[in-house]
Amino acid sequence: MAEPELARRMGALLRRLRDDLSLSQEALADRAGLHATYVGNVERGEKNITVVTLARVLDALGLTLAQFFARLEQQQNEP
């Protein structure tokens, strides 16, 4: 899978998870100690997120890295 496609898919999943919790980008950014602009850029696939920062975002969403990547893999396998 090409890097831009992976970044887009990861960002879309992060947005879906954030929306499921009815959190704004600002609220998620505050919880994760990030800037809301950065969260938006990641969700749109415009920025690559490091594993450390991803772990912070996922912690703010109540998920582990393993849970996130399992969901990402599951989405890839859906028709």
Image (spheres, helix red, strand yellow):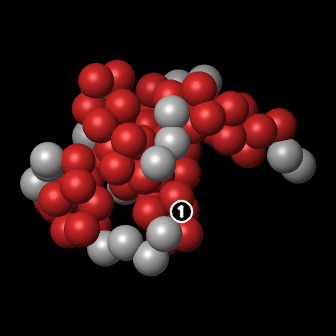
- Give 59 or 74, whichever is nearer the viewer: 59
Residue at image coords 43%, 52%: 61
Q: Where in the figure is residue 31, as x and y percent of width and height?
A: 23, 55
Q: Nearer the viewer, residue 65 or 43?
A: 65
Outermost residue, right direction?
79
Q: Is residue 71 left or right of residue 49?
A: right
Q: Amino acid at mark 1?
A: Arg
Which quadrant of the figure has residue 39? bottom left
Q: Residue at x 73, y 44 (%)?
A: 75
Q: Position of residue 11 (x, y in %)?
A: 44, 48
Give the quarter of the image for residue 50.
top left
Q: Is residue 17 above or below residue 72?
A: below
| Quadrant for the N terminus in the image | top right
- Residue 8: in sight, yes or no? no
Q: Which residue is mark 1?
A: 16
Counting from the top left corner in percent of width and height, residue 48 is at 30, 33
Q: Nearer the viewer, residue 48 or 66?
A: 66
Tell me the residue at 11%/54% (across/down): 35
State how many labels appear: 1
Examine the rendering and report whether any part of residue 35 can be seen: yes
- Kindly state the secondary structure of the residue where label 1 is placed: helix
Residue 53, by quadrant, is: top left
For residue 62, side relative to residue 55 (left or right)? right
Residue 22 is left or right of residue 69, and the answer is: left
Image check: 1 left or right of 5? right
Pointer 1 local density, CA inside 10 Å: few below 14, some 14–19, many at least 20: few
Q: Eyeballing the image, is 56 above or below 26?
A: above
Compared to 77, does 29 lie above or below? Answer: below
For image coordinates 14% across by 48% down, the residue present is 34
